[in-house]
Amino acid sequence: MRGNLLFGSCIVVIEFLSWIQCEPLKNGACESLNDTSCKKGIVLPLWKPVHGLSIGDKIARAFVYFVSLMYLFLGVSIIADRFMASIEVITSKERKVIVRKKNGEMQTINVRIWNETVSNLTLMALGSSAPEILLSVIEICGSNFEAGDLGPGTIVGSAAFNLFIIIGYCVYVIPDGEVRRIKHLSVFLITASWSVFAYIWLYLIIAFFSPEVIQVWEALLTFFFFFLTVLTAYVADTKIFIKKFLKRRYLRKNVKSYALEGDHELHCNHSLEDAHLDGDKKENLTELEKTRMDYIEVIREIRLKNPNIDPKTLEEQAQIEVLNRVPKSRAFYRMQATRTLTGSGNVIKKSKLERRLSQDPDKLGLKEKENNNQKIFFDPGHYTVMENVGTFNVMVKRTGTDEQIAKTMIEVEYCTEDGTATAGDDYIATSGVVLFQSGEDQKPIEISIIDDDIFEADEHFFINLKSPRAVTQDGKKVSINQLTEQNIYGVELIEPFIATIMVLDDDHAGIFNFEEAETVVAESCGEAEIKVCRSSGARGVVLVPYRSRSDTATGGTDYIEVESYLEFMNDQTEAFIKVNIIDDNEYEKDEYFHIELGEPILVKKPGIGKSNIPKEFTGFNHVSEVKTHSDQLVSQSSEIEDMGKPRLGDIKEIKVIIKESLEFKHVVDNLLRHGQLSEFIGTSSWKEQFVEAITVSPGENDTEDSDDLSEEKLPSCLDYVMHFLTLFWKVLFAFVPPTDYLGGWVSFWVCIVVIGALTAVIGDLASGFGCTIGMTNAVTAITFVAMGTSLPDTFASKVAAINDDSADSSVGNVTGSNAVNVFLGIGLAWSIAAVYHFFKGSTFRVKSGSLGFSVTVFCIFALTAIAFMLLRRNRRVGGELGGPRHLKIATTIYFVGLWIVYVILSSLENYCHIKGF
């Protein structure tokens, strides 16, 4: 039924136009009917013969003209699709802005260069109304700079169709009981006022200031109003004057507080703050944070449904879900409507998404090129041993291809080097050569430690590798050049080629402390392990109490509080405190808590029971039984015992910083990086464009079900029909440069030229069609041409009305487009003509009859329509679109009725059945 009402209204108009031409005039001759004779077009020649045609010939010619018009309208829609893609790429450009976070840290973010309102009223409006605007300019230039009826008539007729039919249709398609409300009401009121004023201004300059003569100042002022419209809408959108002149005001909006002070806007509850950012940057910043929070919410929802999802699938599903949720631009909906009608499928295609998300690091040059040398290194590079260990082995390892290891022998020199430990006192110095036989990939180096009974601090020394080389079976050295000639590459040292040996004293109970004053854990780690080290001895069993202390991270919300103790066994040098971290999927999380160590206590008995546990540990029952030798027990009467008692080191408290999961942050960052619609709307190569041109895709949204990525919908029969019907245009326009070239500007200007050429042909065909059936250019313009150029916008507005949560894209853009069409389309064309006639010393004349009457009727109806929409914002309805079913139908009938009456009255006046003014 949704399409039946629109189709029915068109039938009513066509039947009326047929009747009005047949009805004899009662007022005598009509001047406008003199314009129905066929003439040579701007591009197309006159179709001869002109006179003496039979009814059958006229029907055949009218059919050819009509079909050609429809086919050209399809072509214009497809090139407009590429035009809108270039505009989307241009307006989505970003620049880097440095902001300061709450903790004082500076962060670089990307913000959009184009304000949304400005882009909607300039490039977006030009993209959606390019045929009407260019038709007006081309008609003027092609008619020796004389005014015509087709261009201005198309603009006025298109405005009426947009305001009455498109909005009426959008009211109806909203599901019953749902409403869509304009969010940016101030911008809507500004553009609505300008749209009505535009047509009042047209009447004033045609019939009042200088009747039927357009002065240069009138034309230039009309064109200047375009920039004034954009400026006032921008001011209304950004509230720039409020921010500048109100010294101290607190505005409430969407449960957020904004403190306005001078030229600086401070977002009091925002995670990113910078008093040196202006309002526009702040809005971009707020939008970025809002988008990031939307991404995080989507990821949480997907993880809730599928906890075991892998990161790649999570990113793909989140990307699809986010792209379906984010607000779409006018360009997106226009392209979506065109591609659905022509069998080109959805703008956001799953295959394109996967290509964007799975970039090959090799192709991007991100992978470092590795050489093929064999590698020699220590594995591991750090050893910790007790002073009484005696001897132990340090492992040297080599890596390479199987062929290299099997065919070559490698030798490498080694030697020990003092650190705080001294050769001869703490260890036995050694040096030599390690020989890797063919097939061997690791070899040991034996190290001896000297034990003594003197209490001393922990010490360390080093073992160095040097001079690696290959040798032959008979022991001869092989040069690098010889290895290269044999296709067996050289050998090199890689880190760690210096091993560090830490020797712990075994004559002291130990000093206990954390390794560092702070540590960072990921919130997704589940359980964080905080290392406690025991240095300067490891004799005896020691209990070390610990407890957590909340700070910006809160126990029970960000982590599970702990209070217990660690048990270090004899010769044990490290232990771990385990803390459960709560994962709440926060982006850029930076919260912390502390863990404190208590004074360590030496266990004095070989067998310890619960009754022997110090009172500080009462309540803990997991102390294991300790078995030590009597010579390991400490005598309390000995002075040496006092020196060897366990104690805390310098770092007895650690700051545990909880950061966001790197995996989670990577997914969110990828979504932010690839989440722009311009990445899916634009194209990067001619190959991609030609592949898309010859590929038929389902017209329905193929990304609705994000839970099943593998299921692809098949094109319908209608998709195939429309695809092959428009295949010529698709392949032809695939020659347009891709949008990635020069940021979309090359494609932008090429599309304007192509649309201009097609529009010139459309103008000639429309005139030929009108004169063949006896219809004037003025009536042809406000009906067939206006409907043909506005049809893609109708379906685009329908998609926007259903999918968006507001009415701004479907309703707000109509009023802005209507104002821009007059000021840019008529203003530019008439400025060119007026300046031309001024320098020639002639006068640029515009007949006020039909255009003046049509403009007046439209203004009256437009005011009633806008007032009616504003009345629908009351509590009973709640918004401009949708509402209860009976009110929806009544509103749609009212708006469609306004359009029908407008066309009837304009046609009656043009055919002199009623008197104009």
Image (cartoon, helix red, strand yellow):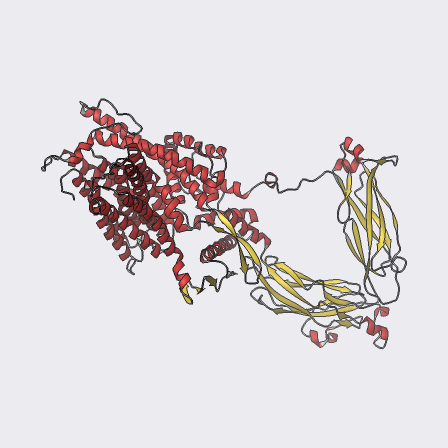
Which residue appears at 40% of the width and 63% of the height? 245
**Image coords of residue 481 (percent x, y):** 79, 33
> In this rendering, is residue 693 above or below 321?
above
Question: Between residues 516 and 304, which one lies in front from this camera angle?
Answer: 516
Which residue appears at 83% of the width and 48% of the height? 444
Q: Which quadrant is the C terminus positioned in? A: top left
Q: Which quadrant is the N terminus positioned in? A: top left
**Quarter assignment of residue 101:** bottom right
**Image coords of residue 360 (percent x, y):** 58, 40
Quick check: can you spot residue 353? yes
Total count of labels: 0
> In this rendering, is residue 450 above or below 638?
above
Quick check: can you spot residue 698? no
> In this rendering, is residue 493 above or below 538?
above
**Image coords of residue 45 (percent x, y):** 28, 25
Question: Between residues 114 and 508, which one lies in front from this camera angle?
Answer: 114
> In this rendering, is residue 905 above or below 97?
above
Tell me if 668 is positioned left or right of 469 in this view.
left
**Image coords of residue 501 (percent x, y):** 81, 56
